[in-house]
Image (cartoon, grey):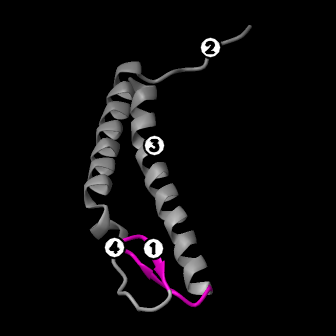
Amino acid sequence: MLRLGMLLLFLPSVILVTLYMIEAQDVARCTHEGGSWDFVNGICDQKNTHEYVTFMARHGIWVNLGMLVSVIGLAMGTWGMILKGMSTPKDRD
């Protein structure tokens, strides 16, 4: 339960940050070329300017579900540590 809890704790955050950074790279490439990034459609527009729309506003379900899975993973990891108990080093004589 401890390993699964730690996996559920960290994996959603890593996935969300990876998706955000991939999109941020596309946005930077578009603005560097003189365009404006259309956040709603996910395309580079060379003619019109578009307002910034946050990642949370566009992908609210995925962000909220990811954070819910992380909280469940935190609870599972905590419960796993409680069940495992404190480990003490063994004496080697």
Give the label, 2 or 1, closer to the camera: 1
Question: For the residues carrying marks 1 and 3, which lies nearer the camera in this image?
Answer: 1
* Numbered label attached to residue 40: 4
Which disc number belongs to residue 43? 1
Location of mark 3 (residue):
11
Residue 65 percent coordinates (x, y): 27, 48
Count of marks overlaid on the render: 4
Q: Secondary structure at mark 4?
A: loop
Q: CA distance from mark 3 to mark 4?
A: 26 Å
- Say which of 76 and 47 sits in front: 47
Q: Residue pushed farthest front? A: 47
Where is mark 2, residue-wise? 90
Q: Which residues are magenta?
A: 33-45
Mark 2 nearby-residue class (10 Å; few <14, some 14–19, many ≥20): few
Q: Nearer the viewer, mark 4 or mark 2?
A: 4
Q: Amino acid at mark 4?
A: Val
Local packing at callout 1 (Cα closer than 10 Å; few below 14, some 14-19, many 20+) is some
Q: Residue at x 43, y 55 (%)?
A: 16
As shown in the figure, which amino acid type bears the numbered disc 2? Lys
Judge from the rendering whether residue 61 lies leftward or rightward of residue 44; answer left or right: left
- Tell me where residue 87 appears, x and y as whole percent: 51, 21
Mark 2 element type: loop
